[in-house]
Image: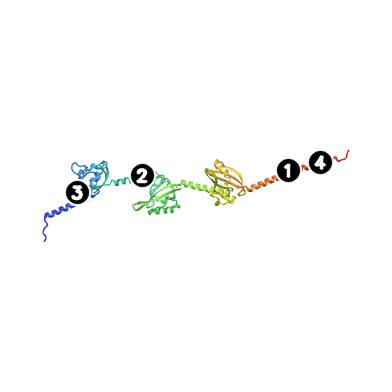
């Protein structure tokens, strides 16, 4: 049988284990990013023990916070936080629950730090003996939170004041948030009237399928191209806007979509009116009986040397026998095969004076007579409205020739009549002279 282990040997082994445990605990505490503590539950939070981490946390050594004449921990807590901390700890102790606190301290050099504390009451039976816990610096985290909050507030101010409509839609397709500009664009008076509505209720029925095609990939976390879309206003009218939208991500999870709308209803209406005006202009332009051409003067050193044909109507083609595709954006000298641009001086005068003019001319290149009206169109632009008067000119010339021939014949006839009358008078006189003498 083995002999009993001497009592002194057991005690020595126990002391070695205790020292080893204390060493391990000291090593652990010295490597923690903060301060472990044991204190009394009094308004001063009188410290009975603090770990070496107190120096990095507070700027004070452990000896400065423990013992007679030490700084009380409560004096380190920001005055505005002292009462709140006391009340929160007492509430937790009444329920025998751990307490978790976030508050400000003032360090030895006067700097302010945010700290996070977790502690618990230590009891002997029902008697509270002390508080034990751990305090760590969370200043960087709080600063980051403050910056994030400031950014969020700036973003909210921008959203609230921008003319662009902001929206956020949840995964159920219903509006979670909208800004005042969105409400105005859709004709709602208050947010409560829009929040909770499904996005499809403000879509033009004919465009609802297209809206679904935009929303579906966004809900899957995919991006979509910005574009132009319609919207159904609360009063039943239709508006138009450009949009940009992106998925809302919470970590790796899609939580919805958000984006901005820019109202272009006025622009769209103006474009539609311009389109209708252009159609009316084009109809008038193409079905005029006269030929019409729009030109632009070109030159060098401020002196016009030529002009370009910018557009022509159908009658231009009919009258001149030149196809539109062969003359548009071409130089006049190339179109008409001339060395000098036809009637350049007349056209320059109209552009420079801003006064229209009219002239009749014979154009030898086409062997035709034209009646041409010229109007300034602003800048270096001018328009010509013309018609072929060759046939009328021929008829006029023929009529003039006929009139001249008739006049000549009339003069000849009158001359003959006069000669005949003079001849008849002479014969009558001779007959009277030859009569009997009484």
Residue, disc 4: 426
What is the x, y in percent for residue 98?
24, 49
Q: Report the Cα–Cα distance between label 3 and label 2.
A: 49 Å
Q: Residue at x 36, y 44 (%)?
A: 154
Residue, disc 2: 154
Looking at marks 3 and 2 on the same chain, the residue that comes earlier in the sequence is marked by: 3
What is the x, y in percent for residue 392?
64, 47
Q: Residue at x 59, y 50 (%)?
A: 320
The disc placed on residue 123 is 3
Res. 46 visible in picture: no
Res. 19 visible in picture: yes
Q: Residues within 10 Å of mark 3 (few under 14, many from 20)?
A: few
Q: Residues within 10 Å of mark 1 (few under 14, many from 20)?
A: few
Judging from the image, the colouring scheme is rainbow
Q: Residue at x 66, y 46 (%)?
A: 397
Q: Is residue 84 left or right of residue 238?
A: left
Residue 190 sits in which quadrant?
top left
Looking at marks 3 and 4 on the same chain, the residue that comes earlier in the sequence is marked by: 3
What is the x, y in percent for residue 125?
18, 49
Label count reads 4
Camera-side residue of 236 and 359: 359
Secondary structure beneath dot 2 equals: helix
What is the x, y in percent for residue 50?
21, 46
Residue, disc 1: 411
The disc placed on residue 199 is none
């Amino acid at each position: 049988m083995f002999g009993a282990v001497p009592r002194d040997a057991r005690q020595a082994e126990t002391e070695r284990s205790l020292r080893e445990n204390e060493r391990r605990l000291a090593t652990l505490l010295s490597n923690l990013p903060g301060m472990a503590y044991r204190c009394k539950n009094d308004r001063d939070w009188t410290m009975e023990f603090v770990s070496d981490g107190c120096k990095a946390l507070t700027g004070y050594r452990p000896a400065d916070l423990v013992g007679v004449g030490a700084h009380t921990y409560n004096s380190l807590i920001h005055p505005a936080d002292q009462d709140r901390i006391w009340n929160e700890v007492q509430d937790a102790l009444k329920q025998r629950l751990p307490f978790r606190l976030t508050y400000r301290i003032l360090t030895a050099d006067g700097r302010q730090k945010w700290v996070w504390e977790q502690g618990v009451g230590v009891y002997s039976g029902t008697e509270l003996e002390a508080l034990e816990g751990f305090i760590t610096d969370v200043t960087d985290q709080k600063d980051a939170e403050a910056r994030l909050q400031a950014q969020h507030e700036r973003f909210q101010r921008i959203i609230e004041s921008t003319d662009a409509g902001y929206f956020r839609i949840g995964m159920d397709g219903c509006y979670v948030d909208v800004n005042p500009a969105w409400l105005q664009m859709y004709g709602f008076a208050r947010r409560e009237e829009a929040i909770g509505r499904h996005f499809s209720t403000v879509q033009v029925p004919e465009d609802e399928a297209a809206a679904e095609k935009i929303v579906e990939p966004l809900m899957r976390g995919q991006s979509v191209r910005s574009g132009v879309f319609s919207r159904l206003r609360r009063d039943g009218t239709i508006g138009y806007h450009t949009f940009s939208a992106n998925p809302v991500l919470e970590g790796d999870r899609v939580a919805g979509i958000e984006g901005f709308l820019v109202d272009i209803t006025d622009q769209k209406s103006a474009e539609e009116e311009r389109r209708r005006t252009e159609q009316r202009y084009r109809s008038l332009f193409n079905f005029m009986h006269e030929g019409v051409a729009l030109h632009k003067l070109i030159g060098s050193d401020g002196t016009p040397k030529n002009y370009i044909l910018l557009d022509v109507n159908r009658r231009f083609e009919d009258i001149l026998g030149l196809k539109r595709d062969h003359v548009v954006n071409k130089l006049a000298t190339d179109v008409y095969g001339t060395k000098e641009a036809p009637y350049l001086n007349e056209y320059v005068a109209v552009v420079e004076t801003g006064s229209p003019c009219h002239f009749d001319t014979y154009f030898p290149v086409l062997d035709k007579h034209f009646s041409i009206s010229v109007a300034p169109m602003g800048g270096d632009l001018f328009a010509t409205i013309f018609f072929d008067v060759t046939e009328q000119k021929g008829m006029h010339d023929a009529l003039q020739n006929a009139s001249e021939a008739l006049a000549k014949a009339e003069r000849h006839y009158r001359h003959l009549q006069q000669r005949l009358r003079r001849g008849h008078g002479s014969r009558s006189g001779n007959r009277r002279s030859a009569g009997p003498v009484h």
